[in-house]
Structures are given as structure tokens and as C-alpha cells.
Image: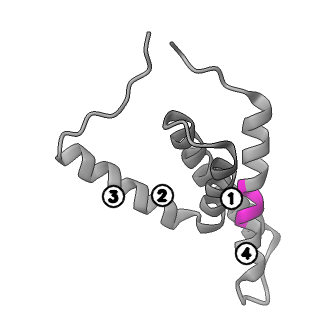
């Protein structure tokens, strides 16, 4: 059974992840930041947040925890992706089978 994608959820979590990326850029001490750095921070945040969002949906994580993890992933950005890459690389080496969508 294929999971339905809810556009409202995607938008909500995408915005929250983008906010995480923007907060990270605002918080960092560089004085002469350009607009493109803020956009880049938001884009990396959205991508990292969406990866975490879909993982949470796959593992049926509660809604509040999913929102929190999406925002944290947006804030962390690239380090989140690095950690997930290491986890899945180790799982592949161990030949762990991940859940599959039912047809």
C-alpha cells in the first residue's frame, strides 16, 4: 500500500525546516552575510528537513516529534545529512533490511 503524500504536511514541515536553516544563518556571527547565504541556508534546511520528515513518516513517528525533528534537521542542515549517510552506510554493510512499501 503506497502512502499518500499530504501537500499540507509537506508545506508545513518544509516551512519549519526552512525556518531552522534561517535561524542557523541569523545566529552565526558573520556580519557581512549576503541574501544568497540566507536562501542557501533555507534550501539546505528544507532538504535535510524533508529527508527526516519522510523517515519519520516511514517509521510512524508522532506528529509533534516529527515537527521537532524536522525543525532540528533544518537547523543542523548538512551535518544531519552526514549522520544519516553514515547510519545507512553501516546498515547496508550489516545487510539490515529496511521496511518496504506494500504493493
Residue pictured at 49% horizontal, 38% vertical: 59
Q: Is residue 24 rendered magenta in the image?
A: no
Say the numbered circle drawn on residue 25.
4
| Residue that badge 3 annotates | 86
| Residue that badge 2 annotates | 81
Height in image: 41 above or below 60?
below
Residue range in magenta is 17-21
| Residue that badge 1 annotates | 71
Gap between marks 3 and 2, in whole Å?
Answer: 9 Å
Most prominent secondary structure in the magenta stretch? helix
Residue 82, by quadrant, is bottom left
Give the camera-side residue of 13 and 39.
13
Q: Quadrant of the C terminus?
A: top left
Q: Residues within 10 Å of mark 1 (few under 14, many from 20)?
A: many
Identity of the residue furthest to the top in this view: 103
Gap between marks 3 and 1, in whole Å?
Answer: 21 Å
Q: Considering the numbered disc 1 on the image, is that residue within a helix, a strand or a loop?
A: helix
Amino acid at each position: 500500500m503506497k502512502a499518500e503524500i499530504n501537500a499540507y504536511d509537506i508545506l508545513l514541515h518544509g516551512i519549519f525546516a526552512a525556518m531552522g536553516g534561517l535561524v542557523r544563518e541569523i545566529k552565526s556571527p558573520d556580519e557581512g552575510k549576503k541574501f544568497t547565504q540566507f536562501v542557501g541556508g533555507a534550501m539546505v534546511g528544507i532538504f535535510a528537513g524533508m529527508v527526516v520528515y519522510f523517515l519519520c513518516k516511514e517509521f510512524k513517528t508522532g506528529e509533534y516529534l516529527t515537527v521537532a525533528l524536522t525543525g532540528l534537521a533544518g537547523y543542523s542542515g548538512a551535518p544531519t545529512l552526514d549522520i544519516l549517510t553514515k547510519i545507512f552506510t553501516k546498515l547496508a554493510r550489516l545487510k539490515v533490511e529496511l521496511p518496504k512499501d506494500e504493493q
